[in-house]
Amino acid sequence: MRQEGRLPPGQSLTLKWPVLHYGSVPRFDEATWRFQVAGLVSSPLRLTWAEFLALPCAEVTSDFHCVTRWSRFDNRWEGVQFRTINDLARPAPEATHAMVYGADGYATNVPLPDLSGENVLFALKHDGEPLPPEHGGPLRLVVPQLYGWKSAKWVCGLEFMPHDRPGFWEQNGYHRRGDPWEEQRFDSD
């Protein structure tokens, strides 16, 4: 697979989809869940679950690379493209990064250029099935070109920022960007 250029250095291919996360799997309550977009935007958002589900959906197929050195090819994701949220919120020109928020205080920072691709989305489904809670359901960000911790689980919003600021794993020694092709696993890489 390396010769096809899909397996980053230091990674091993798996057919399984290992479950990895810090803490317990949060409970989803459709009645109280809100997707909020704030920070440097012209139009802050606060969407209910029904309003989020009413947004246009897309399907993308991409590879997934975990910082723990496994990769899974050809994941089929369905959900709302980041571009859709970006267009609705209309970030200010000085916005350079987004802090993506998940349940229970989790957050990860992502440079806006890494979020702008067609293959970046807020996933509702994986391989044709609703995203299971242990894999971030009901909503997970998918940023295929970065390590999996940047594809935050249990997403409930984001903040557009004028500069980079470390999220949960970045404050605990992980690399600020997390490019698997550069093996950017830890802040010392």
Image (cartoon, rainbow, N blue to C red):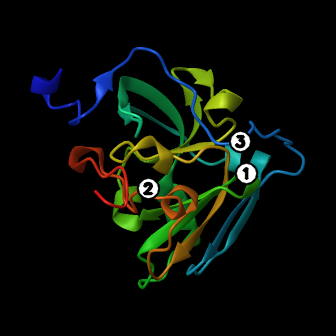
Nearest to N terminus: mark 2 or mark 1 = 1
- Badge 1 amino acid: Ala
- Badge 2 amino acid: Tyr
Which of discs 3 and 1 lies nearer the camera? The answer is 3
Give the residue at mark 1. 103
Give the residue at mark 3. 23
Q: Residues within 10 Å of mark 1 (few under 14, many from 20)?
A: some
Residue lying at the far top of the rendered structure: 15
In depth, the one of 158 and 175 nearer the eye is 175
- Badge 3 amino acid: Gly
Question: Are the residues tagged 3 and 1 within 8 Å (C-beta)?
Answer: no
On the rendered image, what quadrant is the N terminus found in?
top left
The Cα atoms of the two marked residues, 2 and 1, are separated by 20 Å
Classify 140 as above or below 156.
above
Q: Give how far across and how far down residue 51 sits, in percent.
A: 74, 51
SS at circle 2: loop
Q: Give how far across and how far down residue 176 sits, in percent.
A: 40, 63
Give the residue at mark 2. 174
Left of 6 or right of it: where is 173? Answer: right
On the rendered image, what quadrant is the C terminus found in?
bottom left
- Residue at 49 percent across and 46 percent down: it is 149
Classify 59 as above or below 88.
above
